[in-house]
Amino acid sequence: MLTVIHGEDQVKTRAELSKLTTTDAIHLDGKTISLSELMQNLESNNMFADEAKTIIIEDLHKKRSKTDLKEIVEYLATNPSAHHVILWESKDLSATDQKKLVGAKFVAAKLSPVVFKLTDSISPNVPFKTTHTLLVESCKSDSPEMVLVMLGRQIRMMIQTFDPDSKMAPWQRGKLTTTAKQLGMDKLLTLHHELAEIDFKNKTGQLPVDLSSELSIWLTKIYA
């Protein structure tokens, strides 16, 4: 059995993975595992159903050569295993990639369009009320934890615009540079540090309010 969990909303995909993970699950690094290592894990005890295991392969489609990926995907698609094989991907798989995994069950977790509207609105030029409304809507359509991740990503990309050697599409750099200059490097670093603190306190149960409310407070600092 082959299950593929993929999508941009990693909070949701991790939750889906957690539902399927057993206590004796075998975790493999998809970025580095070789075909021979994979075969060894999947073919051991393959004939004994009562010894079937859950085998989780993370990020098989990330940072691999096309040749290696092709070999492994073809093996998974043409050699059904008695084990429950789960591919967890930290991004959306394209329709082409999905077609290659014949017989797999796909579980997708896409981000809502509103969260991208939110990140695009992070600017002192956009009224606070507008951005705050998008924040509230984002925390309802996606998890507040994922909204925090996306806000952190947006601030990091703004910081990267100060480095002319950073890899970024020209249209993306142009779009972010104006806002980055308005906020300034010092403020961007402070905003990013505060998001990291919020994330830590949320994960350790130290937030004085719920995460959505804490992000609302954080948002006001862009306009300070």
Image (cartoon, grey):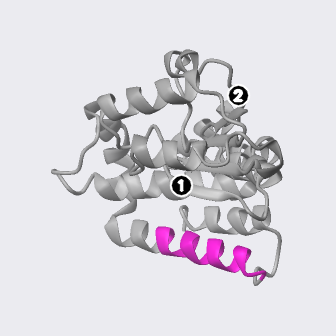
| Residue 34 appears in the rendering | yes
* Quadrant of the snapshot with the N terminus: top right
In the picture, measured across the screen, residue 182 lies left or right of residue 84, that is left
Find residue 147 and report its horizontal and vertical position in percent: 66, 52
| Residue 59 appears in the rendering | no
Mark 1 → mark 2, Cα distance in angstroms: 19 Å
Q: Which residue is denoted by mark 1 in the rendering?
A: 28
- Which amino acid is tagged 2? Phe
* Quadrant of the snapshot with the C terminus: bottom right
Find residue 135 and report its horizontal and vertical position in percent: 71, 49
- Which amino acid is tagged 1? Leu
Pick whichever of labels 1 and 2 is earlier in the sequence: 1
In front here: 114 or 52? 52
Q: Find numbered disc 1 in the image and state the secondary structure of the residue it sits on.
A: strand
Vertical side of 201 occupied by 108: above or below = above
Q: Which residue is denoted by mark 2 in the rendering?
A: 106
User: Which mark is nearer the camera, 1 or 2?
Assistant: 1
Dot 2: within a 10 Å radius of its alpha carbon, few (fewer than 14), some, or many (20 or more) residues? some
Find out whether residue 194 is within the magenta segment. Answer: yes
Find out whether residue 47 is within the magenta segment. Answer: no
Dot 1: within a 10 Å radius of its alpha carbon, few (fewer than 14), some, or many (20 or more) residues? some
Find residue 82 and report its horizontal and vertical position in percent: 72, 37
**Residue at horizontal 69%, vertical 80%?**
201
Mark seen at residue 184: none
The stretch of residues the image draws in magenta is 191-205
Q: Are marks 1 and 2 in contact (CB under 8 Å)?
A: no
Query: Magenta region, mostly helix, strand or loop?
Result: helix
